[in-house]
Image (cartoon, rainbow, N blue to C red):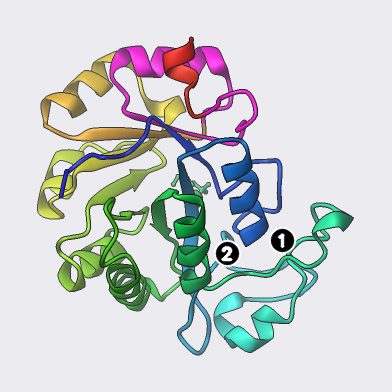
Amino acid sequence: MRTWPYPAIVAHRGGGKLAPENTLEAIDVGARFGHKMIEFDAKLSADDIVFLLHDDAVDRTSNGRGAAKAMTYAQLRALDAGTWFGAEFANARMPTLAQVHERCVKHGLAVNIEIKPSQGRDVETGVLVAREAAHLWADAEVAPLMSSFSYAALEAARDVAPNLPRGMLYERVPVNWRAQTSALSCVSLHANHRTLDEALVAQIKDAGLRILAYTVNDPARARLLAQWGVDAICTDRIDIIGADFLEAS
Ligand code: G3P
Ligand code: MG
């Protein structure tokens, strides 16, 4: 297994800002724009089904109300996860990881699975997301890249699926990033691009890590980050920062 087989551009939440985030429809849009890799957010329902949702609550991205961790997957599945974005997406649902896997195989997409635990469910979410990802992608040529802001979740993922590559995710890179990424045997460090500068990128690269920067929506900034040595750009602007953006520019 190659340690970094991933493309340079990653479509954020499937289809960036052009489709309702974290849905199968978003994945279709990402693929239609020619992208080769997507990022999405995975968490657990009350009955421990792994499904896609960014927030703890369903309110912002569906017609439901309340905490997702208190709902069974059947209850979540009944919600409309598309109309908030646009009437043409009224059939969109919060998909299971299994459905997402199938759709990514269909489109030939590599994935960055962000483990996004609901509050208080870090370890179970890390265990169940990583276990299922390892099972679903067992025969994949390109392994799913696992990441999380939650150290406990990524640690649990490492314990159940040590062979899946991992990236520690930071809103702001902390002083102990070397210790954390080393303890988790990370292949990469994922960071808010606003907190990166040329010197920090060089230090992270010197430590032998790859870097994914999110969420980069300005083409000039994407180009600069790549010049510094950032390996992957996660973007919402899947229309103007295309799969071959860096080669083409
Ligand atoms: O994984 C990169 C990025 O998705 C992290 O931030 O809040 O969009 O999940 P967020
Ligand atoms: Mg995310």
The image shows residue 75 at horizontal and vertical percentages of 68, 86
Residue 213 part of the magenta segment: no
Residue 71 visible in image: no
Which residue position holds label 1? 61
The image shows residue 247 at horizontal and vertical percentages of 42, 15
The correct choice, above or below, for 39 with respect to 121 in the image is: above
Span shown in magenta = 216-242
The correct choice, above or below, for 73 with respect to 132 in the image is: below
The correct choice, above or below, for 137 with respect to 216 in the image is: below
Disc 1 to disc 2, C-alpha distance: 8 Å
The image shows residue 161 at horizontal and vertical percentages of 20, 68
What residue type is disc 1 on?
Thr
Mark with earlier residue (1, 2): 2
Which residue position holds label 2? 53
Decide: few, some or many residues near mark 2? Use Cα within 10 Å; few <14, some 14-19, many ≥20: many
Towards the viewer: 25 or 75: 25
Secondary structure category for the residue under label 2: loop
x 29%, y 33%: residue: 211
Residue 82 visible in image: yes
- Disc 1 CB within 8 Å of nearest ligand 1 atom: no
x 64%, y 88%: residue: 74
x 62%, y 51%: residue: 28
The image shows residue 50 at horizontal and vertical percentages of 46, 75
- Disc 2 CB within 8 Å of nearest ligand 2 atom: no
State yes or no: discs 1 and 2 in contact (Cβ < 8 Å): yes
Towards the viewer: 143 or 79: 143
Q: Which mark is residue 80?
A: none
What residue type is disc 2 on?
Leu
